[in-house]
Image (cartoon, grey):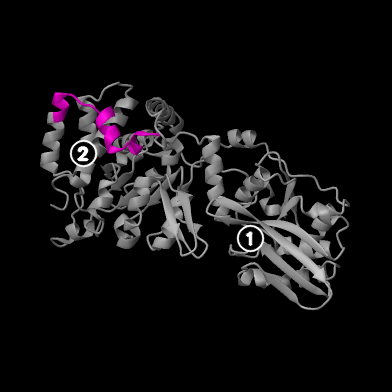
Amino acid sequence: MLVKTYGSAVYGVQAITITVEVNVSGGTKYFIVGLPDNAVKESYQRIEAALKNTEFHMPRMKIVVNMAPADIKKEGSAYDLTIATGILAASGQIVEPELVGKYIIMGELSLDGSLQAIKGALPIAIQARQEGFKGFILPKENAREAAIVSGLEVYGVESIAEVVKLLNGESDLVPTIVNTREEFLQNINNYEFDFSDVKGQENIKRSLEIAAAGGHNLILIGPPGAGKTMLAKRLPTILPPLSLHEALETTKIHSVAGKLQASDALLTIRPFRSPHHTVSDVALVGGGGNPQPGEISLAHNGVLFLDELPEFKRTVLEVMRQPLEERRVTISRAKISVDYPSSFMLVASMNPCPCGYYNHPEKECVCAPGVVQKYLSRISGPLLDRIDIHVEVTPVSFNELSDERKSERSSIIRERVIKAREIQSIRFNEEKEVYCNAQMSSRMVRQICKISDSGQLLLKTAMERLGLSARAYDRILKVSRTIADLSESDSILEEHLAEAIQFRSLDREGWAG
């Protein structure tokens, strides 16, 4: 008997439906075709043990399993349940075999018949709804993640026995239902940190506010213990809330990477990713045989924080240059090319020198001559030019630390950031894929960031003294436009330019000079 069941393969953040044809006929042996990898081929042993331990039986006949389309490589163990259900239906152990074809069925089988979680449940559910499937049967751990797709019956099951009961009409299992909008609105401001916890550092808070308002990349330079990491962790709390579309897009990437918890249905707060400096270039940008998202894609619509930037391998930092500009990364292999979105804010921190006390107001730097310059040269000029804001972080004094007064809350700063973003939203209404000042092209900078003659003179003097590149010129104009937006000013004034120029610390004389 021939039965068709349906699974799905995930490539990038898109899913492709896989038809699993199971034919049970006279003869012996088990054959699986359709370009399966070793994990799929090994499914026979798992399926046989799982069926035996749940009081079903593996037919002692010739079983041929074809996975179509046959030119796409099938990877992973998530097809176990798809194949097992097909075998049970083809051997008459499921009463209505035609009912099987109305569902996408995915899950990894344990030997006792229980199910393990799968990756990519959300994109699979989206594709299932688009193709008109009645429902999606999958492990219980992934049910909430898939249930945010409306118009699709999502059944979270714990074992293959539950699947058979469901398909035979013997189960009272009800579909998992998640109210996506309610879930989104309930948790949208659920942040662990707040800027009110930070003592002093008002100039750093101001730079983070500007960075958040314009989507600018930022680097914090300062001695150990000055609060660089603490400040960076609080940046997501002042970014505008995720829109529902952004939340779904971000959740899809984390779903593909298998990073969602069983309790998560939807990512409602902006991601904050902080890879260790020993990270490889593949782990950062993504890759593998079946290309998986890297840290820059997991930080999509959020913040990528690189602590101790000069300690990262140079090759790792250089692979970020193109994604920073294009806001997406393309991973190409011999037979496949996958695009992952990577629109993130880069926040980096670093010590000014190996000992950490160069330019310190109180402690003496003990580094030998030339060491500071060598340390800073670990970061290439082109990468630094892509970072709009350079800020020097100084240690907090005892008086500021012991001050009992509460600082400004993140929610108040966020309101100003949202107002600035709304101004930018109107400004870029007719532009595709440009949502904030940091994303402006050089052409747009010339059109939008017009400055007066006195402003031109101020900028010319600064560029000559600091030896800034053409890209740095654009960065200053973009940042000054953001400062003007925060001030609700239609034009860029000299004070806006002056404040933007001071955020190029690493270009100033005195830094390793």
Disc 1 residue crowd, few under 14, some 14–19, many 20+, Cα 10 Å: some
Under tag 1, what secondary structure?
A: loop
- Residue identified by numbered label 2: 473
Is 444 drawn above or below residue 25 in the view shown?
Answer: above
Q: Is residue 257 left or right of residue 235?
A: right
Residue 52 visible, this angle: yes
Residue at x-position 41% and y-position 40%: 235
Q: Is residue 160 left or right of residue 258?
A: right
Residue 408 in the image, given as x and y percentages of width and height: 40, 31
Under tag 2, what secondary structure?
A: helix
In the picture, the quarter occupied by the N terminus is bottom right
Q: Quadrant of residue 70?
A: bottom right
- Residue identified by numbered label 1: 69
Of the pair 311 and 435, the residue shown nearer to us: 435
Q: Amino acid at mark 1?
A: Pro
Q: Magenta residues? A: 435-456
Residue at x-position 72% and y-position 73%: 31
Residue 259 visible, this angle: no
Residue 419 in the image, given as x and y percentages of width and height: 41, 25
